[in-house]
Image (cartoon, helix red, strand yellow):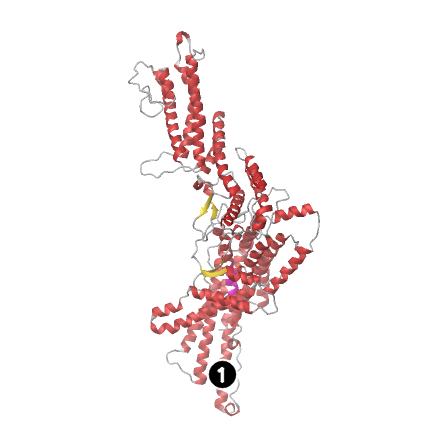
Amino acid sequence: MLHEILLSLSGQPSPLFGTQTGKGAVAQDDFHLLSPPEKALLASVAHLSRLHAQLRTRASEISSVNPSVVCRSVSTAIVGTHLSEFQKKILEVERAILAEDSGYVGGYGIVPLSTIVGEFAPWTRRMEWLWDIVQFIQPERKKGERPHGSTGAELIDHLRTEAHTGYLDIKEMALHLEASAEAAWMKQLSMWLLYGNLPMYGKDDFFIQEDFESEGDEAQFSINSHLLPKFVPAQTAGSILFIGKSLNHIRAKRKTSMTGTSAAPVTLYREHIEQLASLRAPISPVKLSSAVDCIRLSLSQSTLSKLLPLPKILEILDLLHGFLLLGRGEFAVALVSHADARLEESRRRGLTLARNGPSSKLDGLAIKEGDVTTALVQAWAELFSLQKEEDQADDQLELARNLLSLSFSGRKKERPMTPAQNANPIAEISKVSFEDLLFPTPTQLTAQIRAPLDLFISSSDILIYSKIHSYLLGIRRAQIRLGDLWKRTSLRRNHPTPRGPTRSNSAFGQARLKAGRERDNARVRQMRPIWATSSACLFVLSEIGTFFQGEVVNESWQHLREWIEGRSSSTRSAPGSRPGTASSSKLQEDSGTLSLDHGPTGDPFESGSQTMGRHDPEALTVAHRRHLASLVQSLFLTEVPFTNTLRGILTDIDRFVALVIRLENIQRNMDLETDEGVVDAMIDYAQEEREMWEMLRSTRNHVETGMKDLVTSLRNIDDRRSGEGRGSVDFGTDFGQMGLGSQREDSTGPSFSHYMPRKPAGVDRLLMKLDFGSLRTGFGPETSAGLAGMQ
């Protein structure tokens, strides 16, 4: 019987225990001579025997078919280490019994069953714990269910949690399995950090995933946060992704025989291996971050400094600021004017085709992609025509024409940002769209980021730039359209002259002249509320646009550029709040070059270490994304009530301007009927004028209400941000912390150069300007009521 017990504990089938499952499953019918205490003792042995057999079978299955290398490593460690120790324990007990050890064999050669059971009692808890681990890796599934199991990251996190227990033996087993899991994970990580290759085996379980939906020939990679262990900080994961992408890019360049990037020396690879080999399980997040930082800095000193030189990074940032953030004001004016020209041409084409039927009219009014592309091409042509022959060639304008494209939005799939993070930053931006203001069909201006700059700027960064561009361009377009109303002189003033000595001396001529002057005076009185509303609205939009463009966009860009170039804020003059031009941009670049050439000199070692940290490509990436996060919050793009109100007032302004232009055309046709006798029997212009005035009064009321709501939403933003004590920008949110790389705030080494975005002026400054303007212009609730009473 003892021999049968030991065989069953080894995992062999035994008639001593039946085929039933459960802790008390003992073949009692075949052994009637067993007493109840003996049956109770054998029940625990039966449970341990079945656990051992099931555990070995399930672990072997996981080691052979599971797609996760980490799970395979843990299951192999269970079989090769812990089950082997259990087997050794069985052999030790058997050897002691055969040697008649007094610890097991009593008088007359009797071996007490309680002694055998007591010897294996601690293993029951261990086997049950190991079975729970195996069940966690690959649970049992019923018929019809899809196979499901844990990922390597979930298993590592689970083992780290299980190590915190009061049982010393369970803790040791958890630490051993955790070491096996982290060793397998480190092998995958080493392939990525040292060579830029995804692991050959188990790459579907690695947190770096290849993006097969990306456009272009080169591979794109992103982080799957569900496959990232919890002990790896998101900032460190971003650094890991950046290093591997850089190495992968270098290898791709070698394959295509494109020279210009030198390989890193072999000594650096040896240093990288030593850094990774120094990590011991359980891996400390701080030590892992330090190792990744050292690898990143060594690569930056050799390869990445040539792959992503500082002038190339500044060139693309200057381009994004100049065109997508409207730093060059002439581009926005040209784009708006040519877009309006294409819309007018489309409207005329629709009127021409109207005779063929309603469907042809709708086809003529539809905006096609060719119209959108033509508007951008004509804008480029206008900007190039503004250059003088004696001026130097504008390389930035040529680069922008090659990289920027205006197309219908929604054609490309929006992908999340590559660095791992808790929240998608695009989700923080208000869902209110401004992309359908330039054209009736939603369009967006995007930039094509070519390699290797895609290591520095991700597709989601460009998407955020496009959203900011649509937002700022919508405000700028409303300003331009309202300002164009003042160029229509016939609406503002009209001084009819006498018809000549012969006619003016007659009673009929004097009556006609008097009637014309009375008609014009009546129209002027009717238009006074319209001009008051348009003037007040233009003032509000101008102040908001000036605040956004000058205080937020331009100042933030200058602050970022000073940090990149190592200049202090005292070395430059304060830029204007209005959008700049190509000449002003060149002046700023020349002043920046002078400040670099004649900068202060100091300790060479200290200067070199600061430059190394500042020009580190990932540090620049972190600084750029912080700058982008600051822009989004400072432009109130995260404030849904404000963006919703602004979107409504921009729509009302478009309708308001269109009605005023239509009213001008109707009045011109009425004057032709009255003065020249040009009559159109198909149209009743007097009735149309009355209807137009009704719509214009209603739209004017909507515009005035929208302005008041806009100021109210600004006050709410000021009260909320002041109450929370975070000012204009808050880096405590997930969006403010997006993509911060591996720059830890507690790093004190010389190679770490933190960038903190400039804190723009608060909303209270903008509100003070709006309040002062309302007092100066006299536009307010009382004035609005008085103007309404004049109609």
Residue 294, percent across and down?
58, 41
Q: Residue shown at 31%/22% (left/top)?
A: 18
In the image, farthest residue toward the top: 108
- For the question of whether residue 71 can be seen, the reply is yes
Dominant secondary structure (helix, strand or loop) of the stretch shown in magenta: helix
Q: Is residue 520 magenta?
A: no
User: Which segment is the magenta one?
Assistant: 469-477
Q: Residue shown at 44%/36% (left/top)?
A: 69
Name the kind of residue labelled 1 in the image: Gly
- The residue that disc 1 covers is 516
Q: Residue shown at 61%/42% (left/top)?
A: 747
Which quadrant of the rendered structure holds the N terminus?
top left
Classify residue 281 as left or right of residue 30. right
Q: Is the residue 718 above or below the residue 283 in the image?
A: below
Q: Quadrant of residue 436?
A: bottom left
Q: Nearer the viewer, residue 733 or 217?
A: 217
Q: Is residue 473 magenta?
A: yes
Q: Quadrant of residue 79?
A: top left
Residue 48, percent across and down?
39, 23
The tally of labels here is 1
Q: Nearer the viewer, residue 468 or 301?
A: 301
